[in-house]
Amino acid sequence: MSEADPLSAADAARIRLVAALAQVARQDRTALRQVYEMTSAKLFGICLRISSDREAAEDILQDVYIKVWNRAGRFDADRASPITWLCAIARNTAIDWQRSSSRVVTAPEDAAHAIADDRPRADQSIEREQQSDRINLCLDELEGRQGEAIRAAFFDGLTYADLAVRMDVPLGTMKSWVRRGLQRLKGCLGDG
Amino acid sequence: MAEPGTPLSADERDALAAELALGMLTGAEKAQALRLQLSDAAFAAEVAAWEARFAPLHLNYGEHAPPANVWNGIAARLDGPNDISRDAGLHAKLMAWKTGALLSGALAASLALVLLFRAPDSPSVDAPQVAQAAPQLAVAQMVSPKADMMVVARYDAATAQLKLRADNMPQGALVPELWVIPADGKPRSLGFIATTGTTRMAVSPKMRVMLEDGVTLAITMEPAAAVPHEAPSSAPVAAGKITII
């Protein structure tokens, strides 16, 4: 991006979000509400996707914003994008919930439906990053089942055992698919 | 998974770093990876590199507007009886303690304390042998790269017993006291730890509920006393966050 480029809407949203998080770090509730307005649809999408349970996702989302309230002081805008920092909190919180609750692993026939929205959309509201295109291209280049397993591990927060059940292969086979896929992914991303 | 103590090959380490970054690990495997992340800066950097690689994928998640009652729930929790944000004086005092004590670079650089908890009921569909090897366990480890001081702790959620073993803690008139610092920022003493050998403590029901994910634990050096102190008098020599596994 050249310096002559005007500030894009995404850049402006990012700057507003960083500023709001700085206010949250000073325990400003209005700022937390602002962060919520800007990001709750995205973070709820994550909670819903991983928990596959609307009621649970609402509880998880509350926990996420309480964590944001407590951790905003640790956000470093020089090191992380604000939206991916928030998304990571939501994803980890939802995974923790998933691991500690009894649940049935998504059946294979549900899986196709469940992974329907894991491609980038044109209307990303906060920001679009070039790296997002890059890792998606690299995942597309992987051998089919390797890429599918890694996508499911990320987007649905699945363990090896979950993946083995969903894709109906032995645990050892799943491990070697994922591990080979990860190695190739690293190479494709150019830093392996 | 590798046997504990068996050195991992470079490929295995890299795979473990990726699996930790993806959140694929459970139970003893996750505990092993988290311990490695704390004690091995090179491994921690590999985990961070994998997190950075996967980070853009978060943008692929679809959006769903949550119902309005979710914000009300968050607001109610901020307003809860334990909310200290309305008591500016107390809040400032506690923030000063936390900031001065926990965020000081010297402390962060030299010591880390982590408690690895198993969730009380975590039916696991994978690796039954792992589940049997570590039932209802938590592991805590405090290490210092500079001195060879170390505290290892185990928490049994079933009996609410915390067992700590200390090696090479500072010897002198002061004794180490363990604190839990929940979301309200107020340190509560869990009791004193022996400077050498094993300490067993029963965690009271009141304290048990505070041992949650993300809550800070800290050790300060305090004058010996018959009962735990109301509040710490000095900066901690170690602090860290609880991670539930």
Image (cartoon, rainbow, N blue to C red):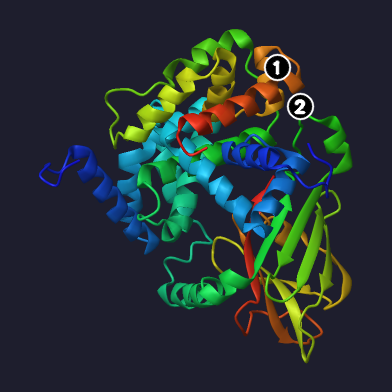
On the image, which quarter does residue B228 sit in?
A: bottom right
- CA separation, marks 1 and 2? 10 Å
How far from the left and from the top, in percent, is residue B80?
A: 50, 56
- Apparent side of residue B200 relative to residue A128 in the rendered image (left or right): right
A93 up-or-down from A161: above or below: below
Question: How many residues crowd around disc 2 within 10 Å: few (fewer than 14), some, or many (20 or more)?
Answer: some
Q: In this view, which residue lies farthest toward the bottom? A: B173
Residue positioned 77% across, 28% down in the render: B126
Quarter of the image where the N terminus of chain A is located: top left
A77 up-or-down from B2: above or below: below
Residue wearing tag 1: A165
Q: Is residue B210 visible?
A: no
Q: Is residue B126 visible?
A: yes
**Nearer to the camera, B1 or B86:** B1
Amino acid type of the residue tagged 2 in the rendering: Val
Amino acid type of the residue tagged 1 in the rendering: Val
Residue positioned 29% across, 36% down in the render: A127
Marks 1,2: beta carbons within 8 A: yes
How far from the left and from the top, in percent, is residue A48?
A: 49, 28
The number of numbered discs placed on residues in the rendered structure image is: 2
Residue wearing tag 2: B125
**Nearer to the camera, A100 or B126:** B126
Mark 1 element type: helix
